[in-house]
Amino acid sequence: MFSLPAVRYLPETADHAAAIEAIAAEAFGPGRFARAAERVREMSPHDENLSFVAIFDGVVVGSVRQTPIAIGSRACVMLGPLAVRPVYKGQGVGRRLMALAEAAARDRGETAIMLVGDRAYYMPLGYRPLPAGSVTMPGPVDPARILGLPLVDGGLEGLAGRVRSRG
C-alpha cells in the first residue's frame, strides 16, 4: 500500500501521453473508442493546461483530461476521461484530480463543465443531470449520464444544443 500524501499531482505534459493511454486502456478497454465522448475528443484536442496526472513513485497512476467544447452557442469544457489504476482506487486520487480540474477550469474563466459519467460517482462532487434531450452528442449516449457542473452562478442555464469543437 502507499501513503496518500506520497501521491503528487501535476499538470499533464506531453511526456505523460503514453502512460495516460495505458491507464485509459486498462480502465475502459477497446470499447472506449466507440463512445460518443471519444467522438468529441476527436473533434477537439484536450487542453493540457486543464488536465492533470497523479504520480506515485515516479509512475503515473491516474489522470483527468478536459477538452474545450461548445454546446450550442455556449463555451464549456468536457471532462474526461478520468481514470485511476485499480490498486489506487478508493484512496481519493480520482476526487483530487477532479478538484484540480474544476479549479483550473474556474480559474481560466470557464462557466461550466460537462461530462458523460456515472451519477453515483459524480453527483456527490456537485455534478447534476442536464435536462434530457438538451445536449446532443456526436453519437449514441445514455442521456441520464450527461452531467454538468456550474462554475459560476447560472453556469448551466441555457446549456443546450449540439456538442461541437470550439474552434
Image: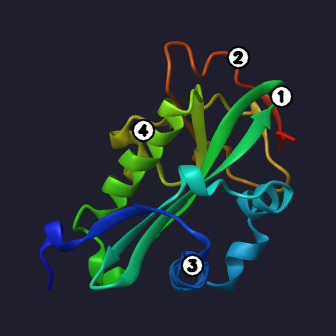
**Residue for point 73% across, 54% down:** 141
Task: Give SS at disc 4.
Answer: helix
Viewer-proximal residue among 61 and 81:
61
Q: Quadrant of the N terminus?
A: bottom left
> Reading the chain from its start, which is encountered first: label 2 or label 1?
1
> Reading the chain from its start, which is encountered first: label 4 or label 1?
1
Q: CA distance from mark 1 to mark 3?
A: 34 Å
Q: Nearer the viewer, mark 2 or mark 4?
A: 4
Q: CA distance from mark 4 to mark 1?
A: 24 Å
Name the residue beneath numbered marker 1.
Answer: 72
**Which residue type does callout 1 highlight?**
Gly
**Relative horizontal placement of residue 52, taking residue 144 as reference (left or right):** left
Name the residue beneath numbered marker 2.
Answer: 158
Residue 151 horizontal/vertical position (percent) = 49, 26
> Reading the chain from its start, which is encountered first: label 3 or label 2?
3
Whether residue 84 is visible, yes or no, is no
Q: CA distance from mark 3 to mark 2?
A: 38 Å
Name the residue beneath numbered marker 4.
Answer: 103
Residue 131 horizontal/vertical position (percent) = 65, 28
Q: Are marks 2 and 1 in contact (CB under 8 Å)?
A: yes
- Badge count: 4
Whether residue 76 is visible, yes or no, is yes
Q: CA distance from mark 2 to mark 4?
A: 22 Å
In the picture, residue 38 is in which quadrant?
Answer: bottom right
> Reading the chain from its start, which is encountered first: label 4 or label 3?
3
Q: Are marks 4 and 1 in contact (CB under 8 Å)?
A: no
> Reading the chain from its start, which is encountered first: label 2 or label 4?
4
